Image (cartoon, helix red, strand yellow):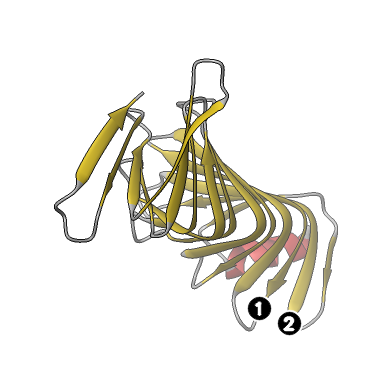
Amino acid sequence: MNKLCKLLIVIPFFVLGCTPNIIENKVTKEINNLNLNIFSNNGDKKYSIKSPYSTYNNFDNKFQFLETTINIFQEGKTKFIINSDKATLSDNNKVIELEGNVKLKTLNQDEDNLFADNFIWNIDETNYLLTGNIKFENKNVILTSGKAKMDSNNIIEFFNPVKYIIKDIDNDNKYEINSENAYYNLNTESMSFEAKDKRVKSIIYF
């Protein structure tokens, strides 16, 4: 328990819940069954991280996690749930990087699922960056690209080249189309895309 208290003193903005099984040396602490809550300066919960195994590096002030589950909160409620094989928390708890089988799920629309190889979020910014084998799928559409960005308004921008498939009422693939940048609005369930010269723009509502 004293070792856990020392960890809390080093990281004052953390609320850390885990079994009292911490193995440490002068630089690195190994922690099993970690449950970490991060709060803003005014006391609002920003996000939480769960991991069955993690390490904390005193020198770099960096956490590394395996088999992570991250909840991102907005106005006290869970907005997104993200799972990944590995994750890193650095820069004084401000930068989260997820790697391997990243899956982001929204709670507003149960069918919405966003997959990627990597996910990066700086909590001082409002955008989430996803790279590598991006795939968004719900009951209406499948979009794929190599890079995507999601903003605080729940709009996902898929960067060129983008492939999207519109499903029919039987949930079968009906139209398969390639385009330049595409945008999907999670709130309105609408998709828009446009060419670089801005002369061609379309919006599809589902």
Residue 41 x/y as whole percent? 37, 55
In this orientation, which residue lies closer to the viewer: 114 or 175? Answer: 175
Q: What residue type is labelled 2?
A: Val
Q: Residue lying at the far left in this picture: please name it.
A: 199
Residue 204 vertical placement versus 72 (above, below): above
Quarter of the image where one finds residue 149: bottom left
First in residue order: circle 2 vs circle 1: 2
Disc 1 secondary structure class: loop
Q: Nearer the viewer, residue 159 or 50?
A: 159
Q: Which mark is residue 67?
A: none
- Whether the residues at callouts 2 and 1 have beta carbons within 8 Å, the answer is yes
Disc 1 residue crowd, few under 14, some 14–19, many 20+, Cα 10 Å: some
Quadrant in the picture for the C terminus: top left
Q: Nearer the viewer, residue 18 or 51?
A: 51
In the picture of the structure, the residue carrying the numbered disc 1 is 58
Q: How far apart are marks 2 and 1 (CA)?
A: 5 Å
Label 2: which secondary element: loop
Q: Mark 2 points at which residue?
A: 27
